Image: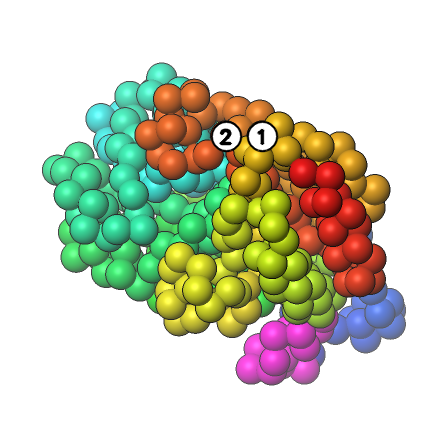
Amino acid sequence: MTDHSQQGFATRAIHLGYDPLQEQGALSPPLYLTSTYTQESLEAFDEIRLGERSGYVYGRTRNPTQALLEERLASLEGAEAAVVTASGMAAISATLFSLLQSGDEIVVDQIVYGTAFTLFTQGLARFGVRAVFADFTRPETVAAAIGPKTRAVYFETPANPNLRLVDIQAVSAIARGKGLLTIVDNTFATPVLQRPLALGADLVLHSATKYLGGHGDLLAGAVAGRKELVDAVRLQGLRYYTGATLSPFTAFLVLRGLKTLELRVQRHSESALRVARLLREHPAVADVFYPGLADTAGAEIARRQQSAGGGLVAFELKGGLDAGRRVLNGLKLARIAVSLGDPETLIQHPASMTHASYSAEDRERYGLSEGLLRLSVGLETPDDILADLKQGLDRA
Ligand code: 4LM
């Protein structure tokens, strides 16, 4: 098999780990639809179970279609290993259940995806794990939140939904200095734009539902990092805490999505930059948050750790939520929907949609404005996206 491991990002996303000539010439990797694997002998089963020989036992923890996806994702993130899961939330919960135990604390950025916030505040609390929230845009507050029971730090950058940026290198250095694991959700940037492991993080998480799958037709998740950590997530988090296995068919679809990931993320970024500029110039808009704008908050961090701004733009209107309602309801191309990273342009209102699980007091305390809108800029013809937004904004 040709070794593609040293080749470019797109080449690895398309070819790595698969030789068609070993699969009857099939250019597209086979989809293995099997739940169990038969063994040549009881001894062979034991050797595979003990990791003494390679092979498969049961589909909850391993499947060849998943394995190819895991190998490619690990390579794209610059990781030793990766494990895929049934959703992004499955990746997060499988990771946390594997690495934390009752009595532990985890320091978490105050701005994370709303359902992840619920897992931290309500879910983990039931199992005796305490989440301590800090403002990760100020690394000194992370240091101050770390105590003797802290085991890990957790954040997203750019963060959902307001795209604030966290300095991965600075936060990882603080965590490493205290012997803690750094877990980064890289869903928004994708490995096309940002590779947290190279900046000092220990584990990278993904909702592969978004850009990695890329077509809005599946749910999937992934965890990448050192083999020892990924093995723990697979053999505990996936095998017996969650059982949240990715179906081989969905793994096949994510593999298909990966082939165009670099192209798509470049186009999402180019269009989003144009959208951010249009928003900035429109008289109805009060504020725009986009990592690719030179004067956005944290732009200097974005320049260091991201190669482009990505496909998401957040903004606030001068007229607040009332104006936001008029704009959202008046859009004709952009769809009102949660999720992101799809070919379709999507727009949503975090306070009532993705981040409704933050209480109004939490949103106030953590700076999540009631009027904030989040746009996932799609792959439609850029001029059409801009024209739709402009006619929508004119209704504000
Ligand atoms: C949304 N997000 O924001 P699954 N990590 C990040 C996310 O944005 C999400 C997940 C994990 C949205 C979904 C409705 C940064 C999800 C969770 O949805 O479980 O694949 O990923 O609109």
Name the disc covering residue 321, or none: 1
Kind of residue at badge 2? Glu
Percent coordinates x, y for residue 108 in the rendering: 33, 39
Which residues, given as a range, are shown in magenta?
2-15
Kind of residue at badge 1? Leu
Percent coordinates x, y for residue 241 in the rendering: 47, 29
Q: Nearer the viewer, residue 375 or 281?
A: 281
Could you tell me how far apart the alpha carbons at marks 1 and 2 are, in whole angstroms?
Answer: 7 Å
Q: Counting other residues with Cα less than 10 Å from the Cα at mark 2, is it few (<14), some (14-19), or many (20 or more)?
A: some
Q: Nearer the viewer, residue 164 or 182?
A: 164
- Specify whether tag 1 is near ligand 1 (CB below 8 Å): no
- Please give the name of the residue rendered at 33% of the width and 30% of the height, measured from the top-left corner: 365
The vertical placement of 167 against 315, above or below, is below
- Please give the name of the residue rendered at 24% of the width and 52% of the height, measured from the top-left corner: 139
Q: Nearer the viewer, mark 1 or mark 2?
A: 1
Residue lying at the far left in this picture: please name it: 148
The vertical placement of 275 against 363, above or below, is below
Q: Quadrant of the C terminus?
A: top right
14 in magenta = yes
Residue 20 visible (yes or no): yes
Check contact, mark 1 vs mark 2: CB within 8 A. yes
Residue 278 in the figure: left or right of residue 202: right
Q: Nearer the viewer, residue 39 or 61?
A: 61
SS for tag 2? loop
Residue lying at the far top in this picture: please name it: 126
Q: Nearer the viewer, residue 385 or 37?
A: 385
Q: Earlier in the sequence, mark 1 or mark 2?
A: 1
Would you name the residue on which mark 2 appears?
370
